[in-house]
Image (tube, grey):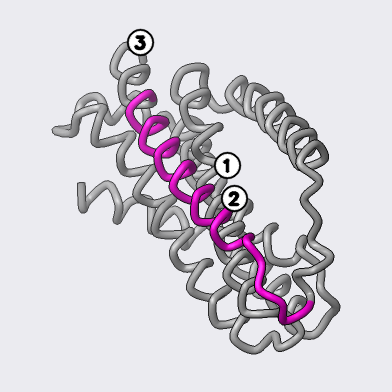
Amino acid sequence: MKALLRKDFYLLKAYCKSYLLICAVFLGVSLAGEANLFFFTYPAMLCGLIPVTLQTYDERSKWTTYSACLPWTRSQLVSAKYLIGLLCSSVILALLGLVLLFLRQYSPEMRLFLWETTLCLSLLAPTLCLPFVFRLGVEKGRMAYYISIGLFFALSYCLIDASGLSLANTWTGEPTHLPAIGAAACLVCAALYAVSWYLSVRVYQKKAL
């Protein structure tokens, strides 16, 4: 497993340097600019798709076929991508935590909620995408991901609109119930990530390479 992770880190170093630059720019803008949730959430979703990017390079280089001759199980091959996703998300969340410490225009409750939201989004992208990628391949898997993520956000918008949840009071120092909602969402996303991991292992074990 350590060798698989090292191989993916080499790929990250060779092909994903631009991701670090983009994340740094967005986090820097979030420090200097107005309150804009997009600058917080985009780096998380971008890094959440790094495992898919690595799998793309694996398929194009025929690594997915060659690896069948090596002493790794398919479960380990899948698990390496999920672990890389967790490591990349951890880096972004740590950086975001530092950024939020300097943003005095947010209440403490809103800072925590932003961090929790970012955690959810960093887990959401690979959770929805990777099972399709391992089952259908990268190209077809991306299309299935776009459809599923669109349906997810449409459903989320409908639920938020129906509940009447407003972020207007989060810009003040007044306590809110949003951190509790965020914590519950994080637990749900973590559980879904584990289910996605299990499903990806199962479908990849049955896939003909």
Label 1 crowding class (10 Å Cα cut-off): few <14, some 14-19, many 20+? many
Quarter of the figure with the C terminus: top left
**Residue type of the residue flagged with mark 2:** Leu
Foreground tag (3 vs 1): 1
Instruction: Provide the secondary structure element on which disc 1 rests.
Output: helix
Q: Which of 174 and 136 is in front in this view?
A: 174
Q: Which of 31 and 1 is in front in this view?
A: 31
Check whether the beta carbons of the residues at disc 3 and disc 1 lie within 8 A of each other: no
Is 9 located above or below residue 29 in the figure?
Answer: above
Whole-number angstrom distance, CA of label 1 to CA of label 2: 6 Å
Q: Nearer the viewer, residue 62 or 113?
A: 113
Q: Is residue 65 left or right of residue 174?
A: left
Residue identifier under label 3: 208
Residue identifier under label 2: 121
Is 190 located above or below residue 207 in the figure?
Answer: below
Foreground tag (3 vs 2): 2
Where is residue 51 drawn, in percent x and y? 48, 44
**Residue type of the residue flagged with mark 1:** Ala
Residue identifier under label 1: 125
Q: Per the image, is 1 magenta?
A: no
Whole-number angstrom distance, CA of label 3 to CA of label 2: 31 Å
Q: Is residue 86 left or right of residue 129?
A: left
Where is residue 2 drawn, in percent x and y? 21, 53
